[in-house]
Image: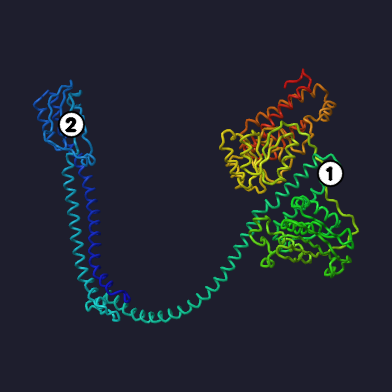
């Protein structure tokens, strides 16, 4: 209290007596209320008990007299008895009957009485008491009946009066007692404290509190003495605190200045980290479009050519495209695993390869892009370089593809040239104990493109970035290609660099070590052919995709299955086509300019005439969130790129209820004649006919159970599909068995709509199979 404001201290001390009196009165009020409530509670039960005893005694007294009056048929006596009963305050009516039911006498309370709800709640409603007049010692039959009406609430008024008095008197008594206690405490304790605090009230803060003479040796004196001792300690601590505060302020000022400097540095580092994170996020978001989309076109065109080509020389193109697609897949995996390069976790292989073949495959891959932009793409190889080398062919392909792709991308007219020389100085030294002589090769990629501004030359090899954001918006790309080139080159002990003049072109060079190889290069191309001779009903399909190569791919894939195709480059064009042309199915790319796939689908589904048209979404980046958005906007299903012929065919089958099998199952007979002939050889024709007929009945029963299942019962679907596949395998029902096996293996990844379509396909194929089986079996033993 020593350091409080003086006015506040005075107010505080003046309010002590008021608060003490107020609290004491409140406590006294509640104590009085509790004690009075207890007394009223006990009085209430005492009143009820007393009333019950009074009525019981009155009835016992009146019973014998009423018996005599009823026995003697004494009406006057009966009147007197009933009047005596109603004189009791709680009894409001009494009547005496003889044994024939005639009234001998009766009386009713004439005093007006107004019942209160509280009295009724406390003591209850009026009660009717019947007493049979019988005295076995005098007469062995009942001579009449006594009826008494009792109203306990008539005693409520007296009870409530007493209760009010008890509460009021108890409260007054306790308040008077509290005031007396307050007065005693005030004169013995409070007044002494107030007198002792006068120096504080007068503002004499540096003086100790004087001890009251009559409290020098009691508890108050001890309290004041201890308080005065602490005042001295507080004064000393106050001086020390003031001194320490001054020192702390100077220290805090210095620390604040240092923290400000550190915060500025941390803010710069934070901004740099945020920028790097944003660049990485942008890179990952563009990865699917920039890498997986061209991979989809290459793989799809390769499969299309491989399935339709009958001319021998076209195999060269198929092999080149398939070979390039593998390289593109390696590029995608390398880009996604860029951190492995940074951490030194990537291993390099050393395999023999032909340099000229490698360069030709790269140029062939880029030829369509060059022709589209009308550029000259050439390659020159120093004749001194050995034809067969040993090294990591795929890493070299990745570096050259990145450099050439960049050169083509940023060149609008002119040329792009790839030159390979022997390194001028042999910077590559063979490892100790390794007899191989290392050959240093320099790969130079020159273009006549836009060049690189001087301010971006230092960061051109940094990951996740390009010269500026307009480059990404104008030319696309992830900004990771040159960073990957640098990591691949430097991890092999090579060097990379460039020279560039703005608006005149750039020259990127890479120096890498190789060794001459005498072994033959390993062929990586494939001559696998896919048989394709479908006989499904033809559909009218609208393909909506902004990438021309994707549209060409889908055209070829659809035409193989005898479907007719219409094409749109964006959602607006698709809506225009749908306004004049009816289609059976729509293949919808998600990411398109003008109007994307999601918005286009919503507009189609909002049109009642088009709402029932199935829509298959296509994207290179399938995530749970994107899948949910596509299904919620109205698409029937979503497939990811690359789209193979078998994937497209099976997806269309699931959507349009077309019976279809995977491309691996093409050419499989509906019935394996070899198995049938083996059974006939072992069991005989008659027994085989009966056995196959029973097998057909069993298979039909399984299919019937399968069709009746809910699509959510995946465990039961898998179990039944497994049983059907096993049965079909034993009896040679090839197509039905493979379709059942496909259902067993893929149902856990299907949507509800896809599962329903697949099960429906199993049912349709089952009907076809067993119809044809009935034609094969002997009629007399065919129960199918």
Q: How many marks?
A: 2
Q: Name the residue under label 2.
A: 148
Q: Which of 70 and 776 is in front in this view?
A: 776
Disc 2 versus disc 1: nearer the observer: 1
The C terminus lies in quadrant: top right
The residue at 24%/59% (across/down) is 26
Residue 93 rendering spot, x and y as whole percentages: 15, 31
Q: Splitting the image into 4 quarters, where does residue 86 fall? A: top left
Secondary element at image label 1: helix
Q: Is residue 461 above or below residue 84?
A: below
Label 2 – label 1 distance at C-alpha: 123 Å
Q: Nearer the viewer, residue 112 or 155?
A: 112
The residue at 68%/64% (across/down) is 462
- Picture disc at residue 314: 1
The residue at 23%/38% (across/down) is 124
370 relative position to 59: left or right? right
Q: Is residue 279 above or below residue 636?
A: below
Q: Which of 6 and 526 is in front in this view?
A: 526
Residue 11 rendering spot, x and y as whole percentages: 25, 70
The residue at 19%/59% (across/down) is 175
Q: Splitting the image into 4 quarters, where does residue 488 fall? A: bottom right
Q: In this view, does 735 lie above or below 205?
A: above
């Amino acid at each position: 209290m020593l350091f409080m404001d003086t006015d506040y201290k005075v107010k505080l001390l003046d309010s002590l007596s008021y608060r003490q009196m107020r609290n004491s009165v409140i406590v006294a009020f509640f104590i009085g209320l509790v004690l009075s409530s207890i007394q009223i509670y006990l009085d209430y039960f005492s009143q009820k008990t007393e009333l019950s005893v009074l009525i019981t005694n009155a009835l016992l007294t009146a019973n014998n007299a009423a018996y005599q009056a009823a026995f003697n048929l004494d009406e006057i006596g009966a009147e007197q008895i009933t009047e005596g009963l109603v004189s009791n305050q709680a009894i409001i009516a009494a009547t005496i009957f003889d044994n024939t039911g005639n009234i001998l006498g009766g009386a009713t309370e004439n005093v007006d009485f107004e019942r209160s709800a509280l009295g009724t709640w406390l003591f209850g409603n009026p009660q009717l008491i019947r007493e049979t007049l019988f005295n076995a010692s005098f007469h062995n039959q009942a001579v009449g009946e006594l009826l008494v009406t009792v109203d306990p609430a008539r005693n409520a008024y007296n009870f409530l009066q007493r209760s009010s008095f008890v509460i009021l008197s108890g409260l007054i008594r306790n308040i008077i007692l509290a005031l007396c206690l307050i007065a005693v405490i005030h004169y013995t304790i409070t007044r002494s404290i107030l007198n002792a605090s006068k120096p504080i009230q007068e503002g004499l803060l540096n003086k100790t509190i004087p001890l009251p003479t009559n409290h020098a040796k009691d508890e108050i004196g001890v309290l004041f003495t201890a308080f005065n001792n602490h005042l001295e300690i507080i004064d000393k601590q106050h001086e020390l605190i003031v001194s320490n505060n001054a020192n702390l302020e100077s220290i805090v000022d210095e620390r604040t200045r240092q923290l400000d400097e550190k915060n500025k540095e941390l803010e710069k580092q934070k901004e740099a980290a945020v920028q790097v994170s944003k660049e990485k996020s942008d890179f990952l978001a563009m990865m699917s479009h920039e890498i997986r989309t061209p991979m989809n076109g290459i793989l799809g065109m390769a499969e299309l050519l491989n399935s339709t080509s009958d001319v021998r020389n076209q195999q060269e193109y198929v092999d080149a495209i398939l070979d390039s697609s593998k390289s593109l897949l390696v590029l995608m995996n390398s880009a996604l695993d860029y951190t492995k390069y940074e951490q030194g976790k990537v291993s390099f292989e050393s395999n023999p390869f032909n340099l000229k073949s490698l360069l030709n495959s790269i140029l062939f891959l880029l030829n369509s892009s060059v022709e589209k932009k009308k550029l000259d793409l050439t390659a020159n190889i120093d004749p001194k370089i050995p034809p067969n080398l040993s090294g990591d062919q795929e890493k070299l392909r990745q570096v050259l593809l990145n450099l050439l792709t960049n050169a083509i991308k940023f060149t609008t007219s002119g040329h792009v040239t790839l030159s390979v020389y022997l390194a001028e100085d042999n910077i590559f030294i063979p490892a100790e104990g390794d007899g191989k002589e290392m050959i240093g090769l320099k790969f130079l990629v020159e273009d006549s493109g836009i060049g690189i501004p001087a301010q971006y030359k230092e960061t051109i090899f940094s990951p996740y970035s390009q010269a500026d954001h307009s480059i990404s918006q104008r030319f696309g790309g992830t900004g990771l290609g040159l960073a990957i080139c640098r990591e691949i080159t430097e991890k092999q002990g090579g060097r990379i660099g460039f020279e560039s003049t703005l608006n005149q072109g750039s020259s990127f060079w890479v120096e890498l070590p190789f060794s001459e190889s005498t072994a033959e290069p390993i062929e990586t191309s494939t001559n696998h052919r896919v048989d394709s001779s479908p006989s499904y009903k033809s559909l009218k399909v609208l393909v909506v995709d902004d990438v021309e190569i994707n549209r060409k791919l889908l055209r070829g894939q659809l035409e193989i299955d005898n479907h007719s195709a219409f094409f749109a480059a964006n959602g607006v064009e698709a809506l225009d086509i749908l306004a004049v042309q009816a289609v059976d199915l729509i293949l919808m790319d998600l990411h398109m300019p003008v109007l994307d796939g999601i918005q286009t689908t919503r507009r189609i589904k909002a049109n009642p005439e088009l709402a029932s048209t199935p829509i298959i979404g296509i994207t290179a980046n399938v995530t749970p969130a994107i899948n949910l958005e596509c299904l919620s906007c109205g698409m029937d299903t979503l497939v990811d790129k690359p789209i193979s012929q078998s994937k497209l065919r099976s997806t269309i089958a699931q959507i349009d209820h077309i019976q279809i099998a995977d491309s691996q199952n093409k050419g499989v007979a509906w019935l394996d004649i070899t198995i049938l002939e083996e059974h006939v050889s072992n069991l005989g024709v008659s027994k085989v006919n009966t056995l196959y007929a029973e097998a057909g009945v069993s298979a039909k029963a399984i299919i019937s159970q399968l069709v009746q299942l809910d699509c959510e019962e995946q465990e039961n679907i898998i179990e039944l599909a497994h049983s059907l596949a096993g049965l079909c395998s034993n009896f040679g029902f090839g197509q039905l068995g493979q379709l059942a096996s496909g259902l067993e293996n893929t149902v856990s990844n299907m949507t509800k709509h896809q599962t329903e379509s697949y099960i429906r396909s199993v049912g349709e194929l089952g009907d076809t199979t067993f119809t044809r089986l009935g034609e094969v079996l002997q009629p007399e033993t065919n129960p199918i």
